[in-house]
């Protein structure tokens, strides 16, 4: 009996017990999967992966998504399994999935192991913040959802769009503004992006320079670091700007007033998953980032 055909459970608690009892079974991902399987139930953890599923026409397979899956709008109507980094096995198992697709940020690892022990195929896709990484994720999702032909068509379309945007960006890349990316969900926890981050990769694609150098990942913002970085532009996500309350609040952060960005009030924001997700909207993301940075420099 496949997991997708388990009888309906009268309660979530009893449902969970049934799933955990299957721990001795091999993961479904190891078994042959027919293309466009009618009984496929997919939980997607990662907004960009959810976008790929929709772009491939496989949204009917979706049983649930995480809280970062906000685009397209239809994804917000699906059952939520919570935040990608704080997943609950019970919440996912209650949706009776046959497969979980997740990014490297998904966790905790103990929950992912519990899902695998319950017989669910858990596929963790590499972040790889490059255009080529996006193409690889599209191919993998296409294989897992039985949409190989659709994946090839999407890859071809994105290659054409990407080449067009890159050509446009390179036409004025000599400007190379220094950009400080601030990641903030609340004013009590403000981080800045170093190397090997999606923000750093996007800035490089846009012909800009990451104002923060000498470290990888994210670290807390300090006045000394901001002043030393001397950014021309400060870049945030729309959520980060909303958390701050206004651009004026960003300009009041310690050290910002002593930078070119602060003096000339160059503050730019973009939708979080569009800017950082490296999903199918990547060509659009680069186009919008390039436009925003150029506009900020011209306005200043």
Image (spheres, rainbow, N blue to C red):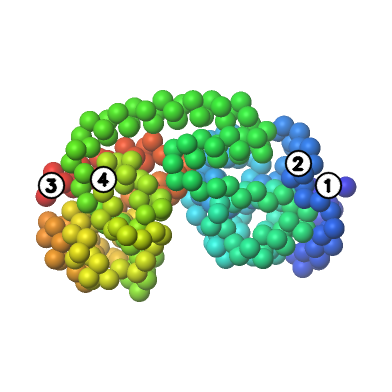
| Mark 2 neighbour class, 10 Å CA radius: few under 14, some 14 to 19, many 20 or more | some
Q: Are marks 1 and 3 in contact (CB under 8 Å)?
A: no
| Mark 3 neighbour class, 10 Å CA radius: few under 14, some 14 to 19, many 20 or more | few
Give the CA distance from mark 4 to mark 2: 46 Å
Q: Earlier in the sequence, mark 3 or mark 4?
A: 4
Q: Secondary structure at mark 3?
A: helix
Q: Could you say where residue 46 lies in the image, as x and y percent from the top left?
A: 54, 51
Q: Is residue 207 left or right of residue 46?
A: left
The answer to whether 117 is drawn above or below residue 206 in the figure is below
Residue 91 is at least partly visible in this image: no
Q: What residue did someone put label 1 on?
A: 2
Q: Secondary structure at mark 2?
A: loop
Q: Is label 4 or label 2 in front?
A: 4
Q: What residue did someone put label 3 on?
A: 299
Q: Are marks 4 and 1 in contact (CB under 8 Å)?
A: no
Give the CA distance from mark 4 to mark 1: 51 Å
Q: Is label 1 or label 2 in front?
A: 1
| Mark 1 neighbour class, 10 Å CA radius: few under 14, some 14 to 19, many 20 or more | few
Q: Earlier in the sequence, mark 4 or mark 1?
A: 1
**Rendered image quadrant of residue 137:** top right
Q: Earlier in the sequence, mark 1 or mark 2?
A: 1
Q: Earlier in the sequence, mark 4 or mark 2?
A: 2
Q: Residue at x 19, y 69 (%)?
A: 255
Res 39 label: 2
Q: What residue did someone put label 4 on?
A: 208
The answer to whether 19 is drawn above or below residue 43 in the figure is below
């Amino acid at each position: 009996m496949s997991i997708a055909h388990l009888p309906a459970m009268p309660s979530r608690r009893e449902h969970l017990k049934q799933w955990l009892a299957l721990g001795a079974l091999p993961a479904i991902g190891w078994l042959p999967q027919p293309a466009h399987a009618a009984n496929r139930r997919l939980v997607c953890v990662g907004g960009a992966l959810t976008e790929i599923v929709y772009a491939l026409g496989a949204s009917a397979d979706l049983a649930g998504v995480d809280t970062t899956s906000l685009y397209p709008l239809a994804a917000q109507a699906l059952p939520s399994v919570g935040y990608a980094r704080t997943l609950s096995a019970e919440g996912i198992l209650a949706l009776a999935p046959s497969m979980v697709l997740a990014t490297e940020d998904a966790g905790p690892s103990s929950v992912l192991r519990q899902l695998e022990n319950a017989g669910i195929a858990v596929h963790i896709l590499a972040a790889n913040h490059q255009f080529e990484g996006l193409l690889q994720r599209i191919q993998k999702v296409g294989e897992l959802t039985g949409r190989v032909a659709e994946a090839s068509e999407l890859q071809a379309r994105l290659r054409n769009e990407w080449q067009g945007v890159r050509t446009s960006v390179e036409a004025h890349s000599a400007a190379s503004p220094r950009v400080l990316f601030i990641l903030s969900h609340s004013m009590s926890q403000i981080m800045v992006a170093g190397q090997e981050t999606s923000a750093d990769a996007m800035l490089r694609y846009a012909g800009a320079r990451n104002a923060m150098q000498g470290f990888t990942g994210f670290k807390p913002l300090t006045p000394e670091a901001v002043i030393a970085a001397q950014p021309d532009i400060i870049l945030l996500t729309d959520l980060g700007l909303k958390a701050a309350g206004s651009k004026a609040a960003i300009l009041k952060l310690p050290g910002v007033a002593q930078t070119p960005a602060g003096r000339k009030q160059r503050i730019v924001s973009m939708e979080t998953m569009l800017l950082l997700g490296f999903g199918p909207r990547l060509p659009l993301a680069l186009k919008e980032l390039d436009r925003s940075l150029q506009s900020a420099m011209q306005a200043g």
